[in-house]
Amino acid sequence: MLIRKPADIPSSEITPPEVWRARRTFIQGAALGVGAAALAPLGAVAAAYPRPGEDEPLTPREFVTGYNNFYEFGTDKGDPAAHAHRLRTRPWSVVVDGECARPGEIGIEDILSGFDQQERIYRLRCVEAWSMVIPWLGFPLGELLARFEPTSRARYVAFETLFDPEQMPGQRRRVLDWPYREGLRIDEAMHPLTLLATGLYGETLPNQNGAPLRLVVPWKYGFKSIKSIVRIRFTAEQPPATWNRMQPDEYGFYANVNPAVDHPRWSQKSHRMIGGGWLAKRRETLPFNGYAEEVAGLYAGMDLRRFY
Amino acid sequence: MTGRDWVAWAKPGVFLLCLLPLALTLAQGLGGGLALGANPVETLLHRSGLWTLRMLLLTLALTPLSRALGRPWPIRLRRMLGLFAFFYGMLHLLVYLWLDRALDWPVIVEDLTERPYIIVGMVALVLMSVLALTSTRGWQRRLRRNWKRLHRVVYLIAVLGVLHFLWLVKADLREPLIYAVILGVLLALRLPWGRWRRAWTQSAQSAPAVARRSASSSR
Ligand code: HEM
């Protein structure tokens, strides 16, 4: 491994422990199913999310929808746009179970009507050292999770993508260990920045971007933001994650954007913003993709070189 | 028309054909718009790398082709195609250094010393430079029999090129494996199958004789 420097987040960027601890107890309250009243402030925190800067324009829609990784439709970045029309997003439902008081299934219509859909302009940093700025539509994952009343044993949340080689022709070859799986720690999952996206650019999520429901965790590499989710499970143990299982030295479970921890085959210190043309300068990659103030506290005391 | 005239006539055409990938790419790049895709630098890097490898494999295909046809003309295109492989290799390096890494030397040095797939590519390119430099008549004469030995390094270069490709992909090995198979075939064609077959048939013919002999002696 080519990890040398410790994560050098300026101390000013780290949320004071009191603040994040307060946030955590509040979030855990929500996690324990305190009720709808508790969710209102969650929305309030969410509304104050940090927006990308002046010099980070939205990535043109045709790139957001025409250049991405979604191996279920093929390994080329043009494959998702070319093949995702095969995906049927209705009817669609998500099974939520595991360590929770009210396991069940929720239909996509209920998800769309039951949660306040907000626009969130987030940076997306791919592990391949490119980035986009995307206006998502969605709502905090925590709002959905709270409805199923996770118990105190729920320390992680596991996610699973649809497996159906008829609709997802990329799954006919075992490039990855299907179905695609990802996981978050419960506090990451309940964090107000963590979004369940149902749309982008003000419209329904295009199939190739993970319709009808996908995760968006803006401070982690893109592969954590699992697409076309059919199952969510609360677990006591760290759940398996597809890329992490396949190449553990290259893709960590946490996969927080971290310029100090290189991918063994390329540097993560900088990235290229899609849409800048062929003379676009590389940009410096920021710890937690620029969201350190909001999320660094989640990892206080953790050695981010070890838990990359 | 003699074979020789034909090749002399065809050479400029082959030359232009070899420039076609570059010309198309330049047209797409300068034409603006989205012809080079969402990530033009990546497109340029990948295209130049692919054409380096393709030109190398084409170069390696000429000797077997000449043998199969029983004609010498493919051999006479060998130097040109080899030099085009080097040319695209240089473009690949230029795209990497200038467009991809923006001449950020500390990062480049890190890449060139720490990332196995880049090291392998660099070794291949350095060796290609040596072959390109010594590709002239003058060097051929000066090195005499050693020239042939030196230029056998091209096999190593091609293997390193394929290895570079295999090591840089994330999960889907299909494309580099196709190149690996083609290279495997081109290398296998160079093995002395004829001699082995003769040796094999000879031993097969002599085997019954041995058997007979041993059978008779036991009587
Ligand atoms: C100093 C020498 C070299 C450097 C620094 C270099 C660097 C690179 C880089 C950075 C990539 C893109 C990796 C990625 O997208 O993750 C690449 C791709 C590639 N390179 Fe090189 N390379 C070198 C030499 C060579 C040589 C000599 C060959 C051929 C014999 C070659 C063939 C390729 C191919 C086929 C690809 C992949 C194209 C694709 O994915 O479609 N490279 N190289």
Image (cartoon, helix red, strand yellow):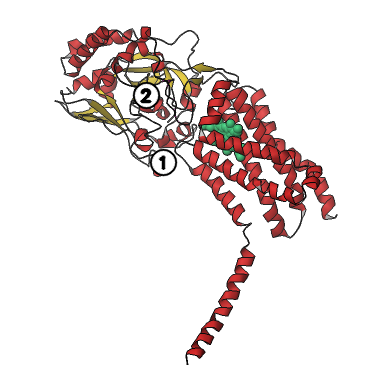
Q: Nearer the viewer, residue B191 or A113?
A: B191
Image side of residue B147 versus residue A162, left or right: right
Q: Position of residue B156 (x, y in %)?
A: 61, 46
| Res A305 label | 2
In the rendered image, residue A262 lying in the magenta stretch gets the answer: yes
Q: Is residue B150 visible?
A: yes
Please tell me if label 1 and label 2 are on a single chain: yes
Image side of residue A110 versus residue A304, left or right: left
Q: What residue is disc 1 on?
A: A175
Q: Please tell me whether mark 1 or mark 2 is closer to you in this view.
A: 2
Number of residues whose C-alpha sits closer than 10 Å to that of mark 1, classed few (under 14), some (14–19) or many (20 or more): some
Q: Position of residue A112 (x, y in %)?
A: 29, 21
- Residue B89 lies, with reference to residue A6, above or below; the image says below
- At horizontal 56% and vertical 45% (from top left) the residue drawn is B179
Image side of residue A36 versus residue B110, left or right: left
- At horizontal 54% and vertical 30% (from top left) the residue drawn is B113
Q: Position of residue A62 (x, y in %)?
A: 50, 23
Principal secondary structure, stretch drawn in magenta? loop
Amino acid residing under circle 2: Arg
